[in-house]
Image: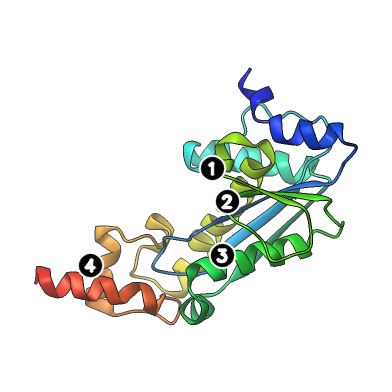
C-alpha cells in the first residue's frame, strides 16, 4: 500500500491529464560547508518505484542504486547548486529556493506542476508545497535521492581532496564533533559558510 500512498499527489494530477509533474527537493541546508544542492525530477506517468523514500531514511548503497534507476527512468531530471558565498549573501532559505528554481529551469521540458518539499519556488508554474514531502510523494523522494547522491559524491570525490584534513567525505559538511575540531585547528576554507560559523564560534568560546 505504501507505494500507492506515495503517489497520491501525482495520481490526482495525472488524472487531470497532466504528464509533466516535477518533484523538487534540496539537500545540504544544515551543513557548515559546501553548496546547497537541489534536484528536480519528472517521472513517467504511472511509474511506481517501490523502494523510493526520503533519502535520509535509506542506506548509501540503496540510495546509489535508486539514483541510477531514477536517472535512467525519469522523463527529465536536473540538478543545480548554489555555493557558500551566495548562501552567506542571501541566506540559506533563499539559496535553497534559488537552487530549486535553477533545477526546475534545467529540466529541458516545461513542467506543468511542481511538488515541492515544504517550500515554494519563484516560478510561474502551478505548485504544491508538501510538509514531509520527501516521505509522502514519490517524485519529491526521487528528487531528494538525486540531490543527496549528487552532493555526497561531491563531498567524497571532489571537495574532500580539495580540502583535506576536515573529513568532508565522512561528515558531508555537517557540524559533527570531528568537523568542529578540524575548524578549530585549521580554520575555515573558502567553501565554509561564514554565516553558519558565527554561532559555532560563540559556542566554542563558551566551551573553551
Q: Earlier in the sequence, mark 1 or mark 2?
A: 1
Q: Earlier in the sequence, mark 3 or mark 4?
A: 3
Determine which of the numbered discs, if any, sits on residue 149 in the image: 2
Residue at image coords 50%, 42%: 60
Q: Residue reaching furthest right?
A: 17
Q: Residue 100: x, y in percent?
A: 65, 62
Q: Which of marks 4 and 1 is nearer the N terminus?
A: 1
| Cα distance between the residues tagged 3 and 2 | 17 Å
Q: In this view, does 136 lie above or below 110?
A: above
| Cα distance between the residues tagged 3 and 4 | 27 Å
| Cα distance between the residues tagged 1 and 3 | 17 Å
Closer to the eye: label 3 or 4: 3
Q: Residue 200: x, y in percent?
A: 26, 71
Closer to the eye: label 4 or 1: 1
- The answer, for residue 53, to whether it is visible in the render is no
Residue position for label 4: 181
Judge from the rendering whether residue 28 lies leftward or rightward of residue 171; answer left or right: right
- Displayed quadrant of residue 74: top right
| Cα distance between the residues tagged 1 and 2 | 9 Å
Closer to the eye: label 1 or 3: 3
Residue position for label 3: 96
Quadrant for the N terminus, please: top right
| Cα distance between the residues tagged 2 and 4 | 26 Å
Q: Which of marks 2 and 4 is nearer the N terminus?
A: 2
Q: Are marks 3 and 2 in contact (CB under 8 Å)?
A: no
Residue position for label 1: 55
Q: How crowded is mark 2: few (under 14 residues within 10 Å), some or many (20 or more)?
A: many
Q: Earlier in the sequence, mark 3 or mark 2?
A: 3
Judge from the rendering whether residue 169 lies leftward or rightward of residue 52; answer left or right: left
Quadrant for the C terminus, please: bottom left
Amino acid at each position: 500500500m505504501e507505494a500507492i500512498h506515495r503517489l497520491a499527489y501525482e495520481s490526482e494530477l495525472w488524472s487531470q491529464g497532466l504528464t509533466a509533474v516535477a518533484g523538487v527537493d534540496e539537500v545540504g541546508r544544515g551543513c557548515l560547508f559546501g553548496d546547497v544542492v537541489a534536484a528536480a525530477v519528472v517521472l513517467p506517468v504511472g511509474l511506481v518505484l517501490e523502494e523510493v523514500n526520503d533519502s535520509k531514511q535509506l542506506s548509501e548503497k540503496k540510495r546509489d542504486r535508486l539514483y541510477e534507476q531514477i536517472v535512467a527512468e525519469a522523463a527529465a531530471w536536473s540538478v543545480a547548486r548554489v555555493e557558500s558565498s551566495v548562501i552567506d549573501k542571501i541566506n540559506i532559505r533563499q539559496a535553497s529556493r534559488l537552487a530549486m528554481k535553477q533545477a526546475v529551469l534545467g529540466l529541458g521540458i516545461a513542467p506543468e506542476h511542481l511538488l515541492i518539499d515544504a517550500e515554494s519556488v519563484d516560478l510561474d508554474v502551478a505548485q504544491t508545497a508538501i510538509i514531509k514531502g520527501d516521505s509522502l510523494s514519490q517524485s519529491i523522494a526521487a528528487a531528494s535521492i538525486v540531490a543527496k547522491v549528487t552532493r555526497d559524491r561531491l563531498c567524497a570525490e571532489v571537495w574532500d581532496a580539495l580540502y583535506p584534513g576536515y573529513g568532508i567525505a565522512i561528515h558531508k559538511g555537517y557540524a559533527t564533533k570531528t568537523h568542529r575540531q578540524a575548524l578549530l585547528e585549521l580554520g575555515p576554507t573558502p567553501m565554509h559558510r561564514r554565516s553558519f560559523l558565527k554561532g559555532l564560534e560563540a559556542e566554542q568560546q563558551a566551551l573553551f
